Image (cartoon, helix red, strand yellow):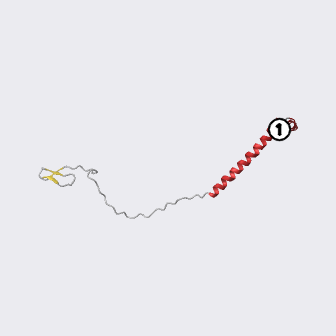
Amino acid sequence: MRSYLTLLSSSSAVRDYAVAGIVLTVLSLVGFHSLSAFIESTQQSVRVQTAKIEKKDEATRQYTVTRSVLDDQVATGSIAGGKGRPIILDPCTGQIKSK
């Protein structure tokens, strides 16, 4: 320990670096603590709001289904009648096309 003290007192370069290191360490600690205090104060001032979704009662819906002819999966065309002769239907109206 005595050798370090004599080195600090005899050499000005070692003394300057030691003082600079101590000052840098103290400034780093002060900066860290001030940054930590700033973050904590920011967290306390910020309000976190959470949204709650409430489920509504299931109401009976009144609706009608409208289908297009193009969406129909049933093949339209001729249907065999009782006499063995085909009945040709109009695909848009469903009426008999020819007799």
Residue 49: image x %, image y %?
A: 56, 59
Image point (77%, 44%), residue name:
23
Q: Nearer the viewer, residue 8 or 49?
A: 8
Q: Left or right of 25: which side holds 99?
A: left
Considering the numbered disc 1 on the image, is that residue within a helix, a strand or a loop? helix
Q: Nearer the viewer, residue 10 or 83?
A: 10
Q: Left or right of 25: which side holds 85?
A: left
Q: Nearer the viewer, residue 6 or 60?
A: 6
Residue 53: image x %, image y %?
A: 49, 60
Q: Nearer the viewer, residue 50 or 30?
A: 30
Q: Up-down: is 71 above or below 58?
A: above
Image point (78%, 40%), residue name:
20
Image point (77%, 41%), residue name:
21
Residue that mark 1 sits on:
15
Q: How many marks?
A: 1
* Residue 46 sits in quarter: bottom right
Residue 50: image x %, image y %?
A: 55, 58
Q: Name the amino acid, label 1.
A: Arg
Q: Residues within 10 Å of mark 1 (few under 14, many from 20)?
A: some
Q: Left or right of 85: which side holds 63?
A: right
Residue 82: image x %, image y %?
A: 13, 53
Q: Left or right of 38: which side holds 63?
A: left
Q: Which quadrant holds the N terminus?
A: top right
